Image: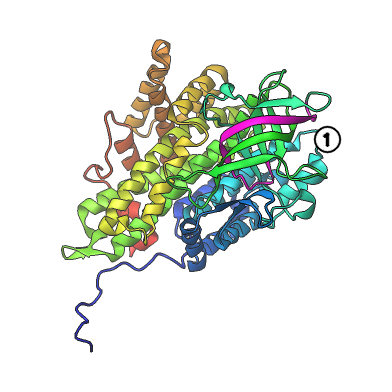
Amino acid sequence: MSAFATHTVLNQVPPLEDYSLYDTDPALREAVRREGADAWAGDLNAHGAWLGRAQTLAAGAEANRCPPRLLSYDRAGHRVDRIEFHPSWNLLMDGIMARGLHSRAWMQPAPGAHAARAAAYLMQGQVEAGTLCPTTMTFAAVPLLQREPAGAVDFAGQWLPALYAREFDGSDAPLSAKRSALIGMGMTEKQGGSDLRAVTTRATPLGAPGRGGAYQLVGHKWFFSVPQADAHLVLAQTDLGLSCFFVPRWIPDGPRNAVRVRRLKDKLGNRSNASAEVEFEEAWGVMVGEPGRGLAVLLEMAGATRLDCVLGSAALLRQALAQSAHHALHRHAFGKALIDQPLMRNVLADLALESEAAMALGMRLARAVDERAGAGARALVRVGTPAAKLWVCKRAVAAVAECMEVWGGNGYVEEGPMPRLYRETPVNSVWEGSGNVMALDVLRALQRESEALPALEAEFARAAGQHRAFDEAVDRWKQLLADGAQAEFHARRVAGGLARLWQAALLIQHAPDAVAQAFVGSRLQAGGHMFGELSAGVDTQAILARAWPAAAC
């Protein structure tokens, strides 16, 4: 033996791989049954097993180590504005599209289809978040395009079949030469941010103006999501008002469109995914929706993307929890495993409560999308989605940071999974409307949707009478809501309180008593909450065994 073998490696945690994301999540499996998606349980089980394979997990890490590159010109000097991706990106997109996360629920509508898609999305987001962006943009665009009449673009005959396809085709080519297509979005401009009415991009008709007509666009976008997509939905000003335009990457039967990618954004996280700044140099586009109603069209699309923000944050929180529980099971300190230390059990159980509550609310909203034919369900989606986005996306940031701390110094090292999870988490709070935008949107929904408050009260009533703290919290929330003079000042309290109450109601009805009691006792009291402040007497063993079954051993 070499004299330089100075130590033996001990007490290091093996990587969490070759496991099923579905089998190891009892709460998710219960939600799938509860929210009407049990018919898809076999598909979800297979999806969870594929995602947990070492090869798939490695692809997620590799796609972020090797981010996309902008190739402005080809070797002959032609302007191409092509985005080049690592093969690991393609592998992940292959899996996403094979399972239909981008369009299947719209193409094959059935009871529980959106809940099943939400469950699959919750698992997919645990492995890699950047690929979710083209997935959710395409998913949100499909129902808008389904109702567009034929005009300068044949949506029903050409584009929808390509969007329904289940084979990923990342080539840069006209639609006629591709096996499938993806859609992106272009709304934000540097002078406006969330104020979309401040858009300055201008669209001029090339013939008869109006829906389905061809236009020429001049302007810019500060954030252009999925610049490699086959088409984008874009906001632009017209003589008829702010309108929405379908801008393909290639003009039908013509050349590449004049959408110039100026640079890719160097982002904090979401590094596998391309986001760009672009300029329209008389780009060709087709009006979608009614003239002057572009903001309404894209805000409808944003409803779907905002729910995916909730699901994406719940996914990151779930993966951070799984990684932390796995670490605590295998890492020893002060003579015993971390998971056997009383204070660590408090922290991990608290994080498990946060994770299950986020998942339960996301899955409940997905069922409401399935039931959107009813006015009550539509109102729940309208008011519940922004509330959930505000609360779940913000809570996930703090929770993932706590999970990183469970790992100690190893959690801060790029070779492990925690830094990427931490960098990914904040984007869902910012994307598709920041916290203030969501809080004010909740107020608007409560004021304008006559069915919203009765539908929420019905949700809360199902859990009433079982926990005094819950009943009192509902009463306090209603009193806050009644203070119209301070409505905007208290908008975050209203929206966050709505989300917590709905989470509590779901857990009271459907989770084990240990989970429901601990959540109500820790989340519905006045004052702040730091993870690891659960009260004495909480059944951490039951909570941890549910969150990570290996903890029961």
Residue in the image at 83% along x and 26% along y: 207
107 vs 492: above or below: below
Main secondary structure type of the part rendered in magenta: strand
Q: Magenta segment: does it hold 462?
A: no
98 to 464, vertically: above or below: below
The C terminus lies in quadrant: bottom left
Amino acid of disc 1? Ala
| Residues in magenta, as a range | 211-231
Residue at x 26% of width, y 56% of height: 408
Camera-nearest residue between 430 and 553: 430
Residue 280, x across and y down, in percent:
66, 35
Residue 36 is at least partly visible in this image:
no
State the quadrant of the N terminus.
bottom left
Would residue 404 appear left or right of 44 to someone viewing this image? left
Furthest residue in direction bottom, as rendered: 1
Task: Judge from the rendering whether residue 458 lies leftward or rightward of residue 139; answer left or right.
Answer: left
Residue bearing mark 1: 150
